[in-house]
Amino acid sequence: MAEAGATSFEIVRGYLPGTIGRIAELHAAYYHKAHGFGLAFEQKVARELGDFCLRIDSARDGLWLLRRDDHIEGAIVIDGVHASSEGAHLRWFIISDSVRGQGHGAELLSAAMAHCRVLGFTRVYLWTFEGLDAARHLYEQVGFRLTQAARGSQWGREVTEQRFEARLDLLAYK
């Protein structure tokens, strides 16, 4: 039996009721507070994540949730729909403020990258923006490298957008 006040974390794979709303909420709250993003960003996350969840193919795609006591505290997605031509797309990677910095992001990222290796994906890419140094550090630890940077506004305000790519066919894993 768990001690009173003990917290239990688990990583679960796949959609659970409330997933879309919670991931959109985590993104909206963090990026508004830290970077001033607003309604356009939250709507983009919710719409695109909802579309992804309707077409998810478990033989190709992956959705992992970090749960604490049945509450979603983080997420990561691998969208493999264009993996053979463009690479698998790492998306919606987020950890709640209350558990950020405790290693759970690295666990989620590890699960997503393991999925890509098991499926034989040769490339994985993601879009982010300049200034997210902790996330960049995690990406670089697993082999992502900056391949493109330019000013853009796909998130509802102008930032220096960055594309990172990991070439899994060139990386050696222990």
Image (cartoon, grey):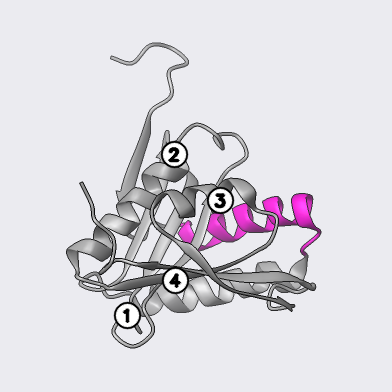
36 magenta-colored: yes
In this figure, which residue is indicated by the disc labeled 1? 83
Q: Secondary structure at mark 1?
A: loop
| Mark found first going from the N terminus, 1 or 2 | 1
From the viewer's side, name the closer residue of 158 and 145. 145
Q: Residues within 10 Å of mark 4 (few under 14, many from 20)?
A: many
* Mark-to-mark CA distance, 3 and 1: 22 Å
Q: Residues within 10 Å of mark 2 (few under 14, many from 20)?
A: many
Compare residues 154 and 161 and report the one nearer the observer.
Answer: 161
Q: Which mark is residue 104?
A: 2
Front disc: 3 or 2: 3
Which residue carries the number 3 mark?
Answer: 135
Element type at mark 2: helix
For marks 3 and 1 on the same chain, the one whose residue lies earlier in the sequence: 1
In this view of the protein, can residue 156 be seen by the observer?
Answer: yes
Cα separation between marks 4 and 1: 10 Å
Position in image of residue 30 (x %, y %): 68, 51
Relative to 83, is 26 above or below?
A: above
Residue type marked 4: Tyr
Residue beneath the point at 34% across and 73% down: 123
- What residue range appears in magenta? 18-37
Q: Quadrant of the N terminus?
A: top left
